[in-house]
Amino acid sequence: MERRDFLKGASAAALYVNAPSDLMISSASAKPVSDKNWDTGLVRHILPTVSDSEILIKLSLNQAQKSPPILRIGNQVVIGKMTDTQGEFWQFFAKNLKPAQTYQLSLKSQQGAQLCQPWDLTTFPAKDSNPGQFKALFISCVGGHEAAGFLPNEVRNRLLRRALSFKPQATIVNGDHVYWDLLSPSTSKVRYGGNTEQAIKIAGKFDRAGLVLGADNETVLKKAVGPQIASVYGADFRSTPVFFLQDDHDYFDNDDAFDEIITFPPSYFMLQLARATQSMYYPEFLADSNRPKGLPYSYAADRPSGVSESFGTIRFGNLAEILLYDVRRTATLAGPSAVCVDIEVEKWLVNRTKSNDVQNLIHCPSNPPGWSAGKWGEFYPDVLGDDKKLSIVTPKPYWQPGWLKQHDRLMNALSGNQARTPLVISGDMHSIALGSMQRTNNFDLSKNPINVALSGTGATYPGGWPSQGWRKTPALPSQVLDFSEEIKPIEQHGFTLVDFTKDKMVLSFFKWDVKTQSVEEIDTLMPFHVKELPRAQG
């Protein structure tokens, strides 16, 4: 499809809204948030995160600064810390802030010049407080270089601004912020591979024996990553806390296994690329007293105090807690005892799931439970046959049975807390979906079935949908599950909003069809499906 035809779109489709009368989303928010009246100054992008007492901000500037910029947060002055070697990227970390407090932020140079217009940012409520509501935005797979045929940045940004128009108090971007695969035989030389002639022309080529920062690799990294993150988000999220969870492509490869190479766990160079990307472009996860300090990739000396790179917590008073976990970085290949997340991470997840000090608790892993596309790095043993159907009769090459065992333990813990309605929201599958898991292997979950959702994707290119790529199959329920689908996977761009109250969670699903809808229709998107999950009374 030519870009001019894409932007022109086609005739509008009828919009179906399945919404209860007390739905918390209103059509009054008919226009996307616009930053035309906010002066970005020298700022290229701003991505903040918050807890009840801390703020961490990652930003980049169009003009390098020789001296650290200064950020004033209320009455507190924070000196920026450079996260690249050229003075373009800076982070600001503030502690000892008041819960549920709106702070005005002001960014200046050492010489006192205003680098952008001041803006507001609000901390989360205290853990023991009792807020009445919380709205969270979920989206995944927003990365991809538009020069490689991914959704144009201006369209991605328009979709994100439509989501922001509903005023979420937190945004979870679940994985695949970057597509620039380097080693996988199946993806490194295709549209989003970093070894294509086009990719090398855009950014250059990485030297795997070189330093990631402070040499030519840093230049390549910025050219490859900047257009996929900074150019997409800009400063639109400056007042909305973000939580970026990494998945396989954020380590600059696809989850693949062949005789010649198994791409995960990540190699040293992959890990350095992922760490450098996070350090420069988006915030790590702030400390949480209920999350052990010793979890892998937490409390590292080269990071802001107390943060975790791969395991996060969103805690909004005693109303809601969202557990975020990367299943790639600590995965093992140990057969029956293999894990997707380190065993200490699993203990943390189970302990929080069993606890009852918060009214709503959901899991947000980087790899989706429920569905399979026959990929190697999934929880499930399903194999995609030559007939493009899934089967568990033939063993999946290089797949680790311990991954499914850990999946089963986590799902059983979710179902086992009868005081809550279980919910898992993830991404990766480039789809929008909703289902219910009643059994996994020998674990009967039917007394408290697990609601499972795929959030929707922000940037997938035409061949990136499961049924359009080389797999030629949509995501399907794994055959090791008893699983019912309320929304069969829809391969369209979109996002999901979740409204939390003490009595229920309300999921609102949005979709936009690049083939049949104009770009302008993004500005008035409303949910095509709404699911109300009353809180369990067990």
Image (cartoon, rainbow, N blue to C red):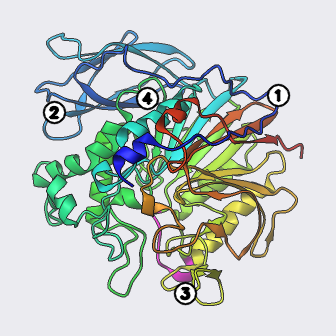
Between residues 498 and 400, which one lies in front from this camera angle? 498
Report which residue position mark 4 lands on: 237
The answer to which of marks 3 and 4 sits earlier in the sequence is: 4
Q: Amino acid at mark 1?
A: Ser
Q: Is residue 204 left or right of residue 492?
A: left
* Label 1, residues with CA under 10 Å away: few <14, some 14-19, many ≥20: few
Q: Secondary structure at mark 3?
A: loop
Tell us which disc is closer to us: 3 or 4.
3
Indicate the position of residue 188 as horizontal and vertical percent values: 30, 69
Give the image quarter of residue 320: top right
Determine the residue positioned at 30% across, 56% down.
Answer: 148
| Residue 415 within the magenta-colored segment of the rendering | no
Quadrant housing the N terminus: bottom left
As drawn, the label of residue 21 is: 1
Q: Amino acid at mark 4?
A: Phe
Name, please, the residue furthest toward the front: 11
Q: How much space separates mark 3 and mark 4, taking CA atoms?
A: 44 Å
Report which residue position mark 3 lands on: 386
Q: Amino acid at mark 3?
A: Asp
The answer to which of marks 2 and 4 sits earlier in the sequence is: 2
Q: Is residue 104 left or right of residue 354?
A: left
The answer to which of marks 4 and 1 sits earlier in the sequence is: 1
Can residue 17 be seen in the rendering of this structure? yes
Tell us which disc is closer to us: 2 or 3.
3
Q: How much space separates mark 2 and mark 4, taking CA atoms?
A: 22 Å
Q: Which residues are magenta?
A: 328-337
* Label 3, residues with CA under 10 Å away: few <14, some 14-19, many ≥20: few
Q: Amino acid at mark 2?
A: Gly
Indicate the position of residue 181 as horizontal and vertical percent values: 31, 64
The answer to which of marks 2 and 1 sits earlier in the sequence is: 1
As drawn, the label of residue 452 is: none
